[in-house]
């Protein structure tokens, strides 16, 4: 990592069908072993199913799911004088979105089910309704931050 200057953030191009940067971010995190076309196919099939099941715009459902799963605070381990404290810190909006996408995909991969499309569909619908494993993870992180509020003075 360079000490001289921070690298510039690269702007992600929007995806070809829905023209959304968030969709492109989800597809990039969904992709494994560089198989982007497979990731796009899985995600677009899932979006089609979301549209059929909810009778709403699937991009709005995905945006709502990511918004619901985004944490506002998290804990970070900080070593002070020989003991380690879990210090609650505010989450940057970009990092919050990245965490939400990561948690949504981890929870949909750990779901029981037949194929990835149905697991992805159900997880996004659940998260948009404020249920599901990704929401549980967010609540757990918020609870940890609340429990360690006394160590907020060690924030950097």
Image: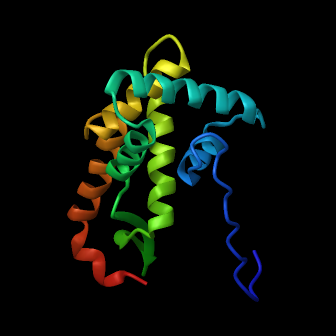
63 vs 126, left or right, is right
Q: Residue at x 58, y 29 (%)?
A: 44
Total marks shown come to 0
- The answer to whether residue 109 of the structure is visible from this angle is no
* Left or right relative to 71: residue 108: right
Q: Which quadrant, please, contains the N terminus? A: bottom right
The quadrant of the rendering that contains the C terminus is: bottom left
The correct choice, above or below, for 77 with respect to 36 in the image is below
Q: Residue at x 68, y 56 (%)?
A: 13
In the drawing, does residue 38 fall left or right of residue 135?
A: right
| Vertical side of 29 occupied by 42: above or below | above
Image position, residue 11 (x, y; %): 67, 65
Is residue 14 depicted above or below 75 in this figure?
A: above
Q: Residue at x 77, y 80 (%)?
A: 2
Q: Position of residue 138 (x, y in %)?
A: 33, 49
Quarter-of-image position of residue 80: bottom left
Spot occupied by residue 67 in the image (x, y as percentages of width and height): 36, 52
Eyeballing the image, is 103 above or below 10?
above
Q: Is residue 69 left or right of residue 19?
A: left
In x, y percent, where is residue 83? Answer: 39, 72
The residue that appears at 67% across and 43% down in the rendered structure is 16
Between residues 115 and 22, which one lies in front from this camera angle? 22
């Amino acid at each position: 990592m360079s000490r001289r200057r921070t690298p510039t953030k690269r702007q992600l191009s929007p995806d070809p069908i829905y023209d959304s940067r968030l969709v492109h971010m989800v597809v990039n995190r969904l992709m494994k072993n560089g198989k982007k076309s497979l990731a796009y196919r899985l995600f677009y099939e899932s979006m089609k199913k979301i549209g059929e099941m909810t009778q709403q715009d699937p991009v709005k459902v995905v945006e709502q799911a990511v918004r619901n799963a985004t944490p506002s605070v998290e804990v970070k381990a900080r070593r002070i004088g020989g003991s380690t404290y879990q210090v609650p810190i505010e989450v940057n909006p970009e990092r919050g979105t990245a965490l939400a996408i990561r948690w949504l995909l981890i929870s949909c991969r750990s779901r029981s089910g037949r194929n990835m499309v149905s697991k992805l569909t159900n997880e996004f619908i659940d998260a948009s309704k404020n249920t599901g494993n990704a929401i549980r993870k967010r609540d757990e992180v918020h609870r940890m931050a609340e429990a360690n509020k006394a160590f907020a003075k060690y924030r950097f």
